[in-house]
Image (cartoon, rainbow, N blue to C red):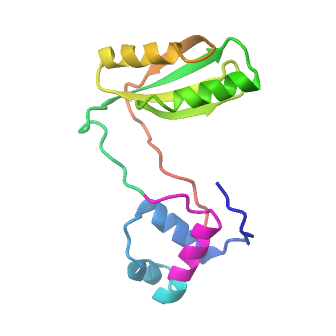
Amino acid sequence: MMSSAKTRTLDRIDLTILDTLQKDGRISNTDLAKKVNLSASPCLERMKRLEKEGYINRYGAFLNANKLGFGMKAFVQVTLDRTTGDVFNDFRKEVVKIEEVAECHLVAGGFDYLIKVLFNNIEDYREILSEIVNLPAVSHTHTYIVTENVKQDAGVPIII
C-alpha cells in the first residue's frame, strides 16, 4: 500500500534497486550500491526513500511448500448468494482466518472471489473446502487443482 508520502518519478537507478531487491532481498547494501553504480550511503538513502514512499512493501523469503507439507495447490472460485457491503466484509473477515488460504482476491466476472489454497493431500483439501463453503453467504464453488507449476510469482515486471 502506498504511504501518504509524496512520490516522485522513479529513475533508472531506483528501478534497478527495486528489480535487484525483488530478485535478491538479502543483497548487502554494499553489493547493491556497486550494482547501481552508487556509493553505499546514497544507495541506502534511495532504498529508505523507496520504502518510505511505499514502493517496497516488505522483505521475505520464498519457502519450499513441498518440504513444509503443502505440496499441492488449488484455485477455488467462490460465488456469493448476494453481494452487499456487509456480506463482502463478513466474508473477508472470515476467509483470512483459514491458514491454508494463501491468497484471496475479489474479482469482476462470473464469480466473486478467487482463492488460492495450499495443502498436502486430497483429504486436507476436502477439510479446507468444507471451511470455505461454510463462509458467510457462499452459494457455490468451483475448484481447479494445479497439476504443474509452469511459472510462479516472479514479482512485479520492472522495465528499466
Q: Is residue 122 above or below residue 56?
A: above
- Write down the region rendered in magenta: 44-59
Residue 53: image location, x then y, percent: 65, 67
Compared to residue 61, the image places residue 19 above or below, namely below
Query: Where's residue 103, x and y in %?
Result: 51, 35
Q: Position of residue 126 (x, y in %)?
A: 38, 13
Task: Quadrant for the N terminus, please.
Answer: bottom right
Residue 3 is left or right of residue 70, and the answer is right
Residue situated in front as seen by the camera: 82 or 113: 82
52 sits left or right of 30 in the view: right
Quadrant assignment, res 86: top right
When the figure is inspected, residue 49 is found, relative to residue 125, above or below; the finding is below
Q: Give the percent coordinates (x, y) of residue 36.
A: 50, 80
Residue at 57% from the left image edge and 55% from the top image edge: 157
User: Residue 158 is drawn in which quadrant?
Assistant: bottom right
Residue 48 on the magenta segment: yes
Q: Residue furthest left?
A: 67
* Residue at the image position 31 percent from the left and 32 percent from the top: 70
The count of marks equals 0
Q: Residue at x 43, y 61 (%)?
A: 23
What is the quadrant of residue 136 in the picture? Answer: top right
Quadrant placement of the C terminus? bottom right
Q: Is residue 124 located in the magenta-colored stretch of the structure?
A: no
